[in-house]
Image (spheres, helix red, strand yellow):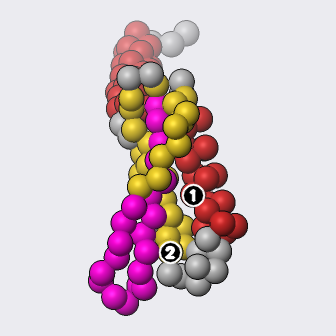
Amino acid sequence: MFSRFYQENIMQMVLRRTINFTERLSVLLKKNTQQCNDGFIGEWIPNRSGHMNFRARVSRSNSGWSYQVESRTGWLGSKSYRFDAHTCPDNSFPQRRQAIKAAQLLAKQLATLRYRFQ
């Protein structure tokens, strides 16, 4: 029914699309595995007064993933901030996303609850 030339063109088209798909997939997989091995630094979360900001930071440790919450004290216009890092004694997680979730939750709670008006 189909000519041999037409069948070869279809096969070439399918092969080209398959190669393009696998190339894109390999780029995504490399990016994803690299991201899973890297640490994480979150966005600054300001408190209500705007005088203090908090952000989550996750890094790889010997026993998994650990986090700390960084605080920045000072006013936005002044370029003199005071930085502090707050760590919890038992903050090791087996998975990166668990550590990120816990660190971001703690940073948000510090900004919106504990140091809300400070």
SS assignment at label 2: strand
Quarter of the image for residue 36 reads: top left
Does residue 80 show up? yes
Give the farthest residue toward the right: 113
30 or 90: nearer the viewer: 90
Q: Which numbered disc flags the more N-terminal residue, 1 or 2?
A: 2
Determine whether 45 is above or below 67 in the image: below
Determine whether 100 is above or below 17 in the image: below
Indicate the position of residue 112 as horizontal and vertical percent values. 67, 69
Residue 82 is covered by the magenta coloring:
yes
Indicate the position of residue 5 as horizontal and vertical percent values. 37, 15
Instruction: Name the residue that disc number 2 marks.
Output: 52
The magenta span reads 65-84
Residue 43 tag number: none
Does residue 6 show up? no
50 or 20: nearer the viewer: 50
In the picture, measured across the screen, residue 105 lies left or right of residue 29, that is: right
Determine whether 55 is above or below 80 in the image: above
Classed neighbour count for the residue bearing mark 2: other residues with Cα under 10 Å, few (<14), some (14–19), many (≥20) = many
Instruction: Name the residue that disc number 1 marks.
Output: 107
Quadrant where the N terminus sits is top right
Identify which residue is drawn at 54% across, 73% down: 46
- Distance from the alpha carbon under mark 1 to that under mark 2: 11 Å
Indicate the position of residue 38 as horizontal and vertical percent values. 36, 37
In the picture, measured across the screen, residue 54 lies left or right of residue 59, that is: right
Which kind of residue does numbered mark 2 sit on? Met
Determine whether 51 is above or below 12 in the image: below
